[in-house]
Image (cartoon, rainbow, N blue to C red):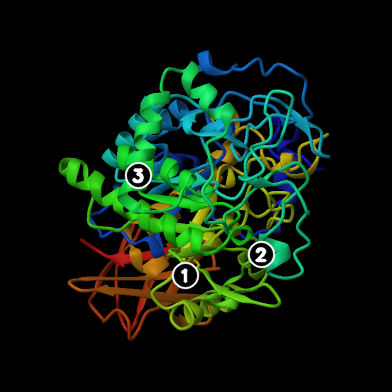
Amino acid sequence: MKKLLIAIAVSALFLTCKQAEKKPQIPDTKVQDSTQIAQKEVPFVWQGANIYFLLTDRFNNGNPDNDLNFERTNETATLRGFMGGDIQGITNKIEEGYFSKLGVNAIWFTPVVEQIHGDTDEGTGNTYAYHGYWAKDWTALDPNFGTKKDLENLVKTAHKNNIRILLDVVVNHTGPVTEKDPVWPEDWVRTDPLCEHTNYETTTSCTLVANLPDIYTESDEAVELPDALLAKWKEEGRLSNELDELQLFFQRTGYPRAPRFYIIKWLTDYVNDLGIDGFRVDTVKHADEHTWLELYAEASKAFETWKKKHPEEVLDDTPFYMVGEAYGYGISEGRKFDFGDKKVDYFEYGFESLINFELKNDAKKNYETIFKKYNSLLNSKLKNKGVLNYLTSHDDSEPFDINRERPYYTANVLLLTPGTSQIYYGDESARDLTIENTEGDATLRSYMNWQEIDSLQETKKVLAHWQKLGSFRVNHPAVGAGRHKRLAKKPYVFSRTYIDENFKDKVAVGLDLPKGKKSLWVKGFFGDGTKLYDTYSETHVEVKNGKVTLENDYNIALLELAD
């Protein structure tokens, strides 16, 4: 059985298959209560943030009127065409409180700049640029995703709800060449050789895949703007303004008019104009690393400029944030990514964090092994830096639990492992990842399963579990950014402590707990007489003889100091 949660008719079989997994028994009456946990006033810490990652086109359709543009009407392979999701749809879900109830305090969505207009078949079936990674014009938004006003409204709405926005940016390549989308000039891009990934040069000075022109990010040679882009701007009535802005940018910075600096200017404009909080940078290892330091420097300047212009909208003094995707990087590597013949410390080039591709394998181990490892590495090799942990993503063909058989355990590992967490849209609702007739990564990119969230009781229970853990995590920086220590082996109890200047946060968590009455050992962490609150069972307890006693059918406890 490949498809999970697709119809009530198979629901009973699905639940039978999952009996082997130890999971919290969340009563139906608790599902709504679990979403009402208010966020507390705590400092924001990127190293312990809870980031939600979604495909803009596949999450929620807020404006059906923008579903078709540029005559994108050709038939595509399964899940390879636009499906209607847009910026307005994300904003609507923020306003509904969906993200806040899940404990999300940052949202990363796939790129929304204007994409190639045509379709192409690169070996996985005919496809349009629904995913956002095939840029045609970095200075405009793709109308399928929405307008700049839509993006401005999204950022403002997110900030009002204490949610940061990460813009997904691509610098190292343009979109593929199609009948509607000519190749960029030869002094802008290389079209061969293909990357072999055997050393630094064959990873950075090459095209990632066939028909994906690669920007000369290593070049300092001045280039002219493409005629096609100039003609496009002229037709849209903004040629003079774009040229004037470029003139001012290059005069201010002194940068040569090399390809990467044009793109850096175009991307950082969104920060300067809208107050974008950070970038998730695509294909980091496929560009000259100095590019990223330059991007970070300009984005940081733009962020500070925006703050000065909009003091009433500033959330706090958190600097601009960049997290990079150096495909294959794992936390065990520490600071340096190894190309074989050269090692690069991307943390020296503007990145506060890198996406960690290692947790999906670590998740097969026991809790303490995972938590101890991440605590050790984040407080030694990666001290004062971070990693972004995930278990599912848009382009990882081997995610953890691809059949969605262990959604409760998945939540426990992802949201309780030290580091920044990345919920991939639908992780919290066990969205199906095994779609029939799909090729390649398309199976990971189905439309968000809102209907199942609304109709299937098991899906509601899974979501309620993620909401409880997410709310606990967002209320306690100690969970992701704090120091880990095991307090008891059986039943398993651990503590997390976070201290920063005048703020201190400490929590204890119990996992794999027995049903009924249970005692959790907290001696040496919480003193006798300390009043605690288990946010999972919504129970007040007091420490006696080094222990707290709970009586319920949950196999998890999330303990915080009672108000």
Considering only vertical position in the picture, is 545 above or below 57? Answer: below
Q: Position of residue 388 (x, y in %)?
A: 51, 61
Amino acid on which disc 3 is placed:
Phe
Determine which of the numbered discs, if any, sits on residue 249 in the image: 3
Q: Does residue 41 show up?
A: yes
Q: Is residue 37 visible?
A: no
- Label 1 sits on what residue type? Phe
User: Residue 347's mark?
Assistant: 1
For numbered disc 3, what is the local secondary structure? helix
Circles 2 and 1: CB atoms closer than 8 Å:
no
Describe residue 32's horizontal placement relative to residue 426 as left or right: left
Q: Decide: marks 3, 2 in contact (CB < 8 A)?
A: no
Q: Residue at point 72% right, 70% down?
A: 199
Cα–Cα gap, marks 3 and 2: 35 Å
Q: Is residue 347 above or below residue 234?
A: below
Q: CA distance from mark 2 to mark 1?
A: 16 Å
- The residue singled out by tag 2 in the image is 328
Distance Cα–Cα, label 3 vs label 1:
26 Å
Q: Is 490 or 64 nearer to us in this picture? A: 64
Q: Residue at x 47, y 20 (%)?
A: 234
The residue type indicated by label 2 comes to Gly
Percent x, y for residue 535?
Answer: 36, 57
